[in-house]
Image (spheres, rainbow, N blue to C red):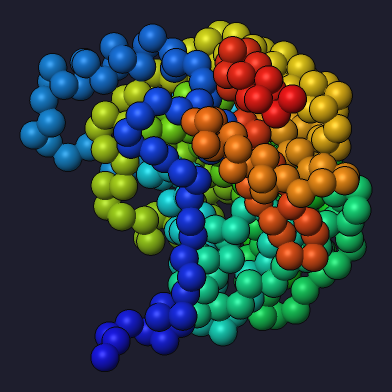
Amino acid sequence: MSYFRPHIDSLAGYTPGEQPQAGKFIKLNTNENPYPPSPNVKQAILAVLDRGLEKYPDPMANSFRIRAAQVLGVEPEWILCGNGSDEILTILTRAFVGEGDRLRLPYPSYILYRTLAEIQGATSEEVRFNADWSLPAAFGQGDGKLKLVFLPNPNSPSGTFIAPDKILEFARSLPCPLLVDEAYADFASDNCVRLVKECDKIMVSRTLSKSYSLAGLRFGFLVAQPHIIEGLVKIKDSYNCDALSIAAATAAIDDQSHLVANTAKILATRSRLETKARELGFAPIPSQANFVWCPHPSQPVKPLYERLKANRILVRYMNYAGWGEGLRISVGTDEQVDACLALLA
């Protein structure tokens, strides 16, 4: 006998990328940053430990909100912090999407969106990208059952980017909020934070897992107009970010010179990875993220993924029904990428 709601029993659940706990691997499968975070992060964590962990943390993570607001050109009241940007996605889905409602996402994209809708007992509606990775006009249309739209920008697995003016056009015609998931925005040529001021339907989520090298810490945040933030605060856990993560995230976003140097290295390696993958016969999609999507025009790629794994190099194999398969290769260090390319060759 099951005690779960029926749609939980039938839920497949989200499967994250492999995280081997033993042995040495070259990990190019989960879009982690290969370089360490700002040295200020360690000092901030040690300072918290020196003060002690006996008391609860600031429930709103205001030290981070103040510094992030300065970096992004908004006010602190426009920011909500979360235990990774995945928690931000969960809070939004719980806030806007009820049983029998509809949540929209592009296809192919981040499959967690679909899982979040299913947990709510809602329907996930997938709108296919065009062949050039643009979105059709239908993405900006909807009826009263559509309660939330997720748009990863840059997208995963493709690394492609939708121009902000097009996103604003979609938002103005939609009957519901639109979340622009900017997990990879620091590697892109533009972002949508400024659109939040122009349209209260637009919200932007960010993570410190990628460009700030803090995937193991779990910290993300949302930028939205204050009346949206006020409603979401009612839903989040009381102390959803711990004292260590708040201090570390604040130190990380404060060190913008480290961010610039870090991303510059990744962008240089990304360009070389695209070029070399093309020389090996792949058809890589020009990326604005810290990974490159590599389909192959004439041969299956799953055997390549398996061969790499057998040699302790992990990339992400993905196969999207009606779209096709490919290898999503995270941008590691030059040495890691060279090892991957040499084995593929």
Q: Please report the residue visible at 59 percent of the width from the left and 12 percent of the height from the top.
A: 335
| Residue 273 sits above or below residue 165 on the image | above
Of 207 and 62, the residue lying toward us: 207
Q: Give the percent coordinates (x, y) of residue 67.
A: 46, 23
Query: At which x and y percent is residue 29?
Result: 56, 37
Looking at the image, which residue is at 13% across and 31% down? 53
Q: Position of residue 325 (x, y in %)?
A: 74, 52
Residue 156 at what x, y percent from top left? 67, 45
Q: Is residue 328 left or right of residue 92?
A: right
Q: Does residue 164 sit above or below 130 in this rendering?
A: above
Res 236 seen here: yes
Question: Can you say which quadrant of the picture contains the N terminus?
Answer: bottom left
Say which quarter of the image contains residue 162: top right
Q: Is residue 342 above or below residue 1?
A: above
Q: Nearer the viewer, residue 82 or 327?
A: 327
Is 34 placed left or right of 321 in the picture?
left
Give me the residue at 22% from left, 37% from top. 57
In the image, 7 versus 196, the foreground residue is 7
Instruction: Kindly tell me whether residue 194 is visible in this rendering.
Output: no
Taking the view exactly as shown, the residue that stands out farthest to the left is 54
User: In the visual, does 100 lie left or right of 42?
Assistant: right
Seen at 65% across and 16% down, the residue is 338
Q: Quadrant of the C terminus?
A: top right
